[in-house]
Amino acid sequence: MKKHILSLLMIIAASVAIQAQSRGVKIGYIDMEYILQNVPDYNEAKNQLEQKAQKWKQEIETKKNEVSRLKDLLATERVLLTKELIEEREEEIAFQEKELLDYQEKRFGPKGDLTIQKAVLAQPVQDQVFNAAQDIAEAKKYDFIFDKTSDLTILFAAKRYDISDQVIRVITRSNKRNQMSKKQLKEEEKKEALENMEDESPALAERNKKLAERKAAREKLIADKKLAAEERKQQALAAKEAKKNGTAVPKTESKSTAKDSTSTNKGTDSLKPAETPIKTVDSTAINKKIKAAEDRAKTLEERKKAIEEKKKQALEKREAAKKAREEKLKEGKQD
């Protein structure tokens, strides 16, 4: 393996020396472990495999407990057993231990199910990484792209040559393209072109980052102003309703007002939004109005009860008269 690595290094060095005479050499590298951790499909399948491995571990633990139980039972009953029975028990324990070791090797050994399934799981992603790295190398004129996690030892690698994030973007986009509309594809292509420009120019990336931060700050300021205006509107409506109903509404300080008062303490009184004044209502007048309303309601209730009582009495009289007439008719028929 070392001979192959040395040969590869010598070939690369010779190529670099030849190409360096005509133009600069462009080198990049990827971190396969980092890429695998950031590919959603791989992580989902990996979680499923880990759940399966956890189940295997539980099965192994159950087998270990069974072997321990047989050993403890033999130790307890040894004095009561014959030589043949002891040998039979020991053979059973040895057989169970061998089965346990075989099962551990089958599941977690160097050629076990876990190792094989991990390789099968990573292979499609590794193929995608290989294709993505080739596309990036051709598009951006890279001369060499290395895998940081391979057997090839890299003693130092500057972060600016790491194209792992670019590879992840290529893989993610290729997986999403089939589900995108034409409009979304165009937007994604524009975004991809901008990101490629940022990859090539760190200064442009920093500038775009600052612009995005300023835009976010402006949007937040506009949202805060809208919230303050809405709160003032609600406050004015509440005051109007209170005046109409003759009830007092306590003055509440909105979030925007509290924020403005803080800024006032810092010497920014000009930024404080205008507050809508709320007229206070005399509590004595309110109490009089409430009492008058209660008296009117009480009088109406009493009148209603009196009318109901009169109706009831009239019905009773009518019913009594009816019964009296019926009795007279019956007496006349009998005569």
Image: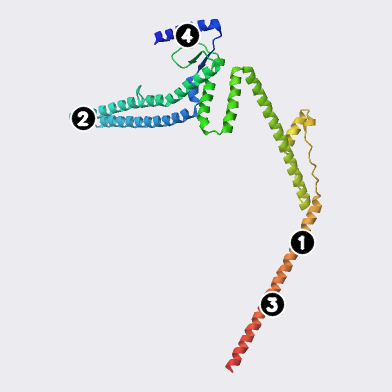
Q: Secondary structure at mark 2?
A: helix
User: Within 10 angstroms of label 2, few (less than 14), some, or many (20 or more) residues?
Assistant: few
Q: CA distance from mark 3 to mark 2?
A: 108 Å
Q: Is residue 252 left or right of residue 109?
A: right
Q: Which residue is mark 2?
A: 88
Q: In the rendered structure, which disc, 3 or 2, sits on the residue that comes first in sequence?
A: 2
Camera-side residue of 310 and 76:
310
Q: Amino acid at mark 2?
A: Glu
Q: In the rendered structure, which disc, 3 or 1, sits on the residue that comes first in sequence?
A: 1
Q: Amino acid at mark 3?
A: Ala
Q: Secondary structure at mark 1?
A: helix
Camera-side residue of 46 and 274:
46
Q: CA distance from mark 2 to mark 1?
A: 102 Å
Q: Which residue is mark 3?
A: 314
Q: Amino acid at mark 1?
A: Asp
Above/below status of 227 relative to 12: below
Which residue is painted at 59% across and 19% down in the image?
199
Q: CA distance from mark 4 to mark 3?
A: 119 Å
Q: Which residue is mark 4?
A: 12
Q: In the rendered structure, which disc, 2 or 4, sits on the residue that comes first in sequence?
A: 4
Q: In the rendered structure, which disc, 4 or 1, sits on the residue that comes first in sequence?
A: 4
Q: Secondary structure at mark 3?
A: helix
Camera-side residue of 151 and 247:
151
Camera-side residue of 133 and 39:
133
Which residue is painted at 69% across and 32% down in the image?
220
Q: In the rendered structure, which disc, 4 or 3, sits on the residue that comes first in sequence?
A: 4
Q: In the rendered structure, which disc, 2 or 1, sits on the residue that comes first in sequence?
A: 2
Q: Which residue is mark 1?
A: 295
Q: Report the colour scheme.
A: rainbow
Q: CA distance from mark 3 to mark 1?
A: 29 Å
User: Within 10 angstroms of label 4, few (less than 14), some, or many (20 or more) residues?
Assistant: few
Which residue is painted at 54% across and 4% down in the image?
21
